[in-house]
Image: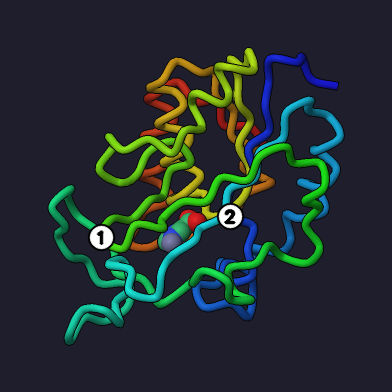
Amino acid sequence: MKPANTALIVIDVQNDFCPGGALAVAGGDEIISRINGLMDDFATVVLTQDWHPANHASFAANHPEATPFSLTTMPYGPQVLWPTHCVQGTEGAAFHADLRTDPAQLIVRKGFRPEIDSYSAFFENDQATPTGLEGYLRNRGVTAVTLVGLATDYCVAYSALDAARLGFAVTVLEGACRAIDLNGSLAEARDRMRAAGVALEA
Ligand code: VGL
Ligand code: ZN
């Protein structure tokens, strides 16, 4: 059992990020059995769920002539335009059927504002609008977080960087994550996490 001040945060293990899904991450389903086992080691377990309205601004389909995986500029900065994924209430947005959800005390939904994307479990992509997770964790005496899930270079990395910036001790278990790796995004995310003091472990 990990110390009580350490929380496990499981990022976006949803059907659309697993093989066969709308934004499938290679090997996304391979991490599930390890994550299920880890849940027994942590007193606090949080799941996040990407949860977009159909008119979400991060979907290429909502931008005339844009193709999936192209880059655009939003008021808050650069934004990748994704295939339509994790639409609220759809099977694609559901957690993978093999993921244990019973041990989780909190499920954080993010990305539900049509005009702004939300990779991080802590803040929207404007880096300013909070999800409330910071307050939840602090209120429960959590000072360290272990992150696993999908995808290493987007939602896991953004969550890790925010957690480090907020002063949590952060570990990413890379073996329990899988990456999208778009134009070198994985190497860049690993560099940024290391520079921020995030412990990258196997
Ligand atoms: C994610 C792209 C778009 C993720 C979510 O979970 O990493 N990536 N939405
Ligand atoms: Zn998304």
Q: Is mark 1 within 8 Å of ligand 2?
A: no
Asked which quadrant contains residue 37, the reply is: top right
Q: Is residue 31 visible?
A: yes
Q: In this view, does 40 lie above or below 154?
A: above
SS of the residue under disc 2: loop
Q: Is residue 187 above or below residue 63?
A: above
Please name whichever residue, 132 or 26, is drawn nearer the observer in this view of the structure: 132
Crowding around mark 1 (Cα neighbors within 10 Å: few <14, some 14 to 19, many 20+) is: few
Residue corresponding to mark 1: 115
Please name whichever residue, 196 or 165, is drawn nearer the observer in this view of the structure: 165
Q: Position of residue 99 (x, y in %)?
A: 77, 57
Q: Residue shown at 74%/61% (left/top)?
A: 30
Q: Where is residue 98 in the image (x, y as percent from the top left)?
A: 81, 63
SS of the residue under disc 1: loop
Q: Is residue 179 visible?
A: no
Q: Which amino acid does label 2 sit on?
A: Asp
* Camera-nearest label, 1 or 2: 1
Residue 60, label in figure: none
| On-image quarter of the C terminus | top right
| On-image quarter of the N terminus | top right
Crowding around mark 2 (Cα neighbors within 10 Å: few <14, some 14 to 19, many 20+) is: many
Mark 1 and mark 2: Cα distance apart in space: 20 Å
Q: Position of residue 127 (x, y in %)?
A: 28, 37
Q: Is mark 2 within 8 Å of ligand 1?
A: yes
| Ligand 2, image quadrant it occupies | bottom left
Q: Which amino acid does label 1 sit on?
A: Glu
Earlier in the chain: of badge 1 and badge 2, it is 2
Q: Where is residue 101 in the image (x, y as percent from the top left)?
A: 77, 51
Please name whichever residue, 68 or 126, is drawn nearer the observer in this view of the structure: 126
Q: Residue shown at 44%/36% (left/top)?
A: 122
Residue corresponding to mark 2: 12
* Left or right, residue 83 beside residue 17: left
